[in-house]
């Protein structure tokens, strides 16, 4: 699944266009490598996103096309959250 679509489906970032902009700014890494919005994700990948003054790392547990709001957090696990 594309990175921007996963971020929207998992509700880490609310809109796909916003996820695309964040990726274009170079604030997202997959397994330590710079990511584009079109990067393909797989289960087990580690996703690092810089939100303002903090860096959040997630591990991808599952990939689904659609998911209910209350089940969205099952798609990933929060590994760490650190302030810059």
Image (spheres, grey):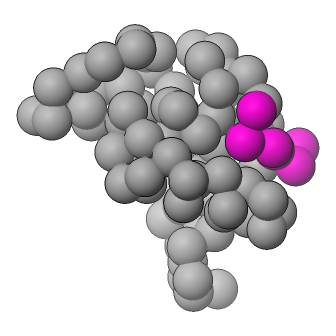
In terms of depth relative to the viewer, which is nearer, 26 or 80? 26
Task: Spot the residue most to the right.
Answer: 33
| Residue 69 higher or lower than 67, as above or below | below
| Residue 33 higher or lower than 25, as above or below | above
Q: How many numbered markers are drawn? A: 0
The image quarter containing residue 43 is top right
Q: Position of residue 75 (x, y in %)?
A: 37, 26
Queried whether the magenta region covers residue 60, the answer comes back as no
Is residue 25 something one can see in this rendering? yes
Left or right: 63 with respect to 41?
left
Range of residues picked out in magenta: 32-38
In the picture, which quadrant includes the C terminus? bottom right
> At x 43% / y 52%, what residue is drawn?
15
Q: What predominant SS class does the magenta segment belong to?
A: loop
Task: Spot the residue most to the left.
Answer: 70
Left or right: 23 with respect to 9?
right
Queried whether the magenta region covers residue 36, the answer comes back as yes
| Residue 63 higher or lower than 35, as above or below | above
In the picture, which quadrant includes the N terminus? top right
> At x 72% / y 42%, what residue is drawn?
37
Q: Position of residue 52 (x, y in %)?
A: 57, 83
Is residue 79 something one can see in this rendering? no
> At x 78% / y 30%, what residue is drawn?
39
Left or right: 18 with respect to 2?
left
> At x 49% / y 65%, what residue is drawn?
81
């Amino acid at each position: 699944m594309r990175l921007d679509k996963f971020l929207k489906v998992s509700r880490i970032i609310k809109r796909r266009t916003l996820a695309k902009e964040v990726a274009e700014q170079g604030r997202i890494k997959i397994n330590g490598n710079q990511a584009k919005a079109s990067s393909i994700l797989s289960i087990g990948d580690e996703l690092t996103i810089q939100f303002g003054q903090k860096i959040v790392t997630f591990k991808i547990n599952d990939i689904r096309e659609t998911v209910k709001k209350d089940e969205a957090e099952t798609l990933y696990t929060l590994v760490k959250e650190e302030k810059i």
